[in-house]
Image (spheres, grey):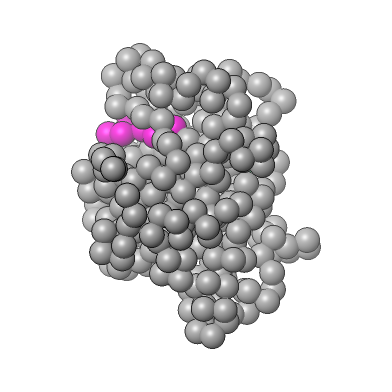
Amino acid sequence: MKLNRETLKGKLVFLGTAGARYVAFGFERQAGGLYFGFPSLNVHVDPGPGAFVHAHRKGIEPHWTDVVILSHRHLDHCADVNHVLESMTLGGKKKRGLLLCPSDCIAEDPVVLEYTRKNIEKTEIVKEGMEREFLADLSVSFPIRHLHGVETYGLIFKWKGTVYSYISDTKFFEELLSAYKGSNLLILNTTLLKPNPRIDHLSAEDARVIIGELKPDLAVLTHFGRTMLSAKPWEVALSISQETGIKVIAAYDNMILDLESLSVVRQR
Ligand SMILES: [Zn+2]
């Protein structure tokens, strides 16, 4: 199903579900990030490799984007950020748009070019605890710095009283539980099947703990590494759902979620 400007409103599109090196850069799944079509603001979170093309193929014109948010500078989260920003400004013709990212995305060895940043309206540096209001009924906050090597934040959108959380890459730590408390929708980057102390990513076991504790209305697993793909993410989601009593689904590429009903839009 292709979207258009009208049908994008109130939808969240999973332009990718690939996690980490092998799956993202072996192109076993797409890595185009999350596209939030809030009715008066389009936000592209973590535009990884191919984001620009995947959005376009789904009917989303990249120049509709108003805000781009990077959770961190790893390329599976930002490889296409320059394409998206360039598109937002129609090749630098129209100064518009906002970029939110951690400071090391634009510091030495920047992942966002100075050239594309000059063409947009504003770049704001994300810091722990920051809250940013976009519209009267729409805001984003970055509750806690994650443990993931480089500077990394998850985010929480509040829209019309509903709380949409995205726990981006991190290893598990206790404070995640209080930081994302009260989420209606909880998206978890669940890269590993089993915890691996040498890899700073959440595992399915961590996801079960977080979901069981936070009890969102809906939890969505995404950002899968190879161990998750071989275990069939939908089966992992089902078992977490059975254990916790919470509705848990595994995202698939180009999945569309209705932001109001928190249900998957059936596609033909
Ligand atoms: Zn990462």
Q: In the current view of this chain or complex, which residue is farthest to the front? A: 268
* Quadrant that contains the C terminus: top left
The residue lying at 64 percent from left, 55 percent from top is: 79
Instruction: Tell me where residue 250 sits by quadrant.
Output: top left
Instruction: Tell me where residue 171 sits by quadrant.
Output: top right
| x and y percentages locating residue 266 in the rendered image | 26, 40
| x and y percentages locating residue 11 in the rendered image | 31, 52
Front in this rendered view, residue 240 or 229: 229
Against 112, residue 210 (above or below) is above
| x and y percentages locating residue 136 in the rendered image | 28, 67
Q: In the current view of this chain or complex, which residue is farthest to the right? A: 108
The residue lying at 66 percent from left, 42 percent from top is: 25
Q: In the current view of this chain or complex, which residue is farthest to the left? A: 261
Query: How many dots with numbers?
Result: 0
**The magenta stretch spans which residues?**
214-221
Front in this rendered view, residue 3 or 126: 3
In the image: residue 125, left or right of residue 211? right
Q: Does the magenta-highlighted stretch encompass residue 215?
A: yes
| x and y percentages locating residue 78 in the rendered image | 61, 54
**Is residue 144 among the parts visible in the rendering?**
no
Q: Does the magenta-highlighted stretch encompass residue 265?
A: no
**Is residue 108 among the parts visible in the rendering?**
yes
Instruction: Tell me where residue 8 sits by quadrant.
Output: bottom left
The residue lying at 55 percent from left, 38 percent from top is: 29
Against 9, residue 230 (above or below) is above
Front in this rendered view, residue 188 or 161: 188
In the image: residue 133, left or right of residue 199? left
